[in-house]
Amino acid sequence: MVRRGWGWLAVVLALLACNLTEQPPTATPIAPQPPTPPIQTAWGQAAALAQSPSISPSALAADGDGFTLAAFQPIGGGVERLTLFTDGQPIQTPITARAPYALTLHTAAEGGFFAVWLDHDPARGSQLTIARLNPDGSTANGALVAAEMPVVRYSAATQPDGSLWVVWSATPIPEPALFSSRVDGRGRARTPERIQAAADHPTLLRADGQTWLYWLSEADGAAYRAELTDAQPSAAVRVADGPTLAPSDTLTSLSVGADTTHAYLFWQIMAADGGGQVWWTAGASQEGGWPPAIPLGLTTDPTESPQAGFNHGALEGAGLGTELTGWLLPASGQSDALPTAAVWSGGLGVVYWRGGLPFAAQTVVEDAPRLIAPPAVASNTERDLTLAWWDAGDPVTATLYTAISRR
């Protein structure tokens, strides 16, 4: 049975301060820091975009034929400002916060974005906060709290009509429950609805023209799935048994990805020493009864030259093996081959999946950076890939890097 990540969450919250503001409060300016030099990768130079006390995966979104990242950066006085980086160029926004974490970025209509994050308030717990941003970083409504309840974690997915569906776990009752809300194109959220009792670790997947919700049951630790609709979710389907963890291990996240025939679930585990480990399972996208989750081990074969359909350069063959994967996060969306950002065999790169198994891999950074959260990968309309990660260079500040695989 899975051991929940309450200990890790308590550590995170203890490090955070309070209060969100929509306009910048008075802050003592921070002295400019010398630029961090880029690092060399298999895709060329990886630029250092930002420095921040981040403990979350990179907030990355594919934007047409480009890519945009988002990050909160300290501006002094315990305040952090949200900055967008479109194709590497910084765009300041008016959004500030005091204790933001778990930031994600999602595309919106007319080239805009939804920025979603949790902001910790000691009196009210972690608040789910959403800002609808224009391409130039401006916003009509500022940052809005989407749920007046203490939120544990969330997942979000853009819908074809330009809205955003958000599902989160919250604890207004003795055990976690799942709630959902639709956010319209202007960033206004509907009244939350409770959709699943005794559940945690929600993760959304947009595939086969539908929106699927996966979660972990508090009763048996297994993964379940339901289709989200404007009415109520469909009947829950038991997908697979989850991992059995050591007492010192903590489950930090559940993520989902899909190719055209299969869906994949990945459990990200944090060991007591701070190292990562990944468990996984896969099955037909709309069926249950998948195999139980197992640790993800890989092997690569440099004599093979598979193709995954992206502008990625030379790949190696890949399959299941004994080299355990430390960190992994799948790309959003659905394609013939699913790219996942991963750390294995001492390097950082991309593992590609098709038909329920890994089949190709590419090491992008030979020496894996010091990660405290999974890297991220996304593909754009030109089939380029971007890989982004936070390198924990010291105990206080991490550096956001990104590398792009353009032709």
Image (spheres, rainbow, N blue to C red):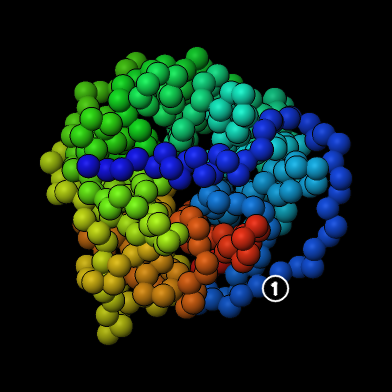
For image coordinates 61% across by 75% down, the residue present is: 39
Residue at 58 percent across and 78 percent down: it is 40
Question: x%, y% of residue 319?
Answer: 23, 69
The reply to whether residue 401 is in sight is: no
94 with respect to 236 (left or right): right
Position of residue 75 relative to residue 306, above or below, is above
Q: Answer with left or right where residue 247 lies relative to residue 49.
A: left
Q: What residue would you read off at disc 1?
A: 37
Label 1 Cα crowd, 10 Å radius (few <14 / some 14-19 / many 20+)? few
Residue drawn at 30 percent across, 67 percent down: 324
Residue at disc 1, secondary structure? loop
| Nearer to us in this view, 145 or 122 | 122
The amino acid marked with disc number 1 is Pro
333 relative to 285 in the view: left or right:
right
The image quadrant that residue 26 belongs to is: top right
**Residue 310 visible in the current orientation:** yes
In the picture provided, is 300 more to the left or to the right than 389?
left
Above or below, comparing residue 203 to residue 384 in the picture? above
Q: Quadrant of the N terminus?
A: top left
- State which quadrant residue 120 falls in: top right
Residue 334 position in % (x across, y down): 35, 48
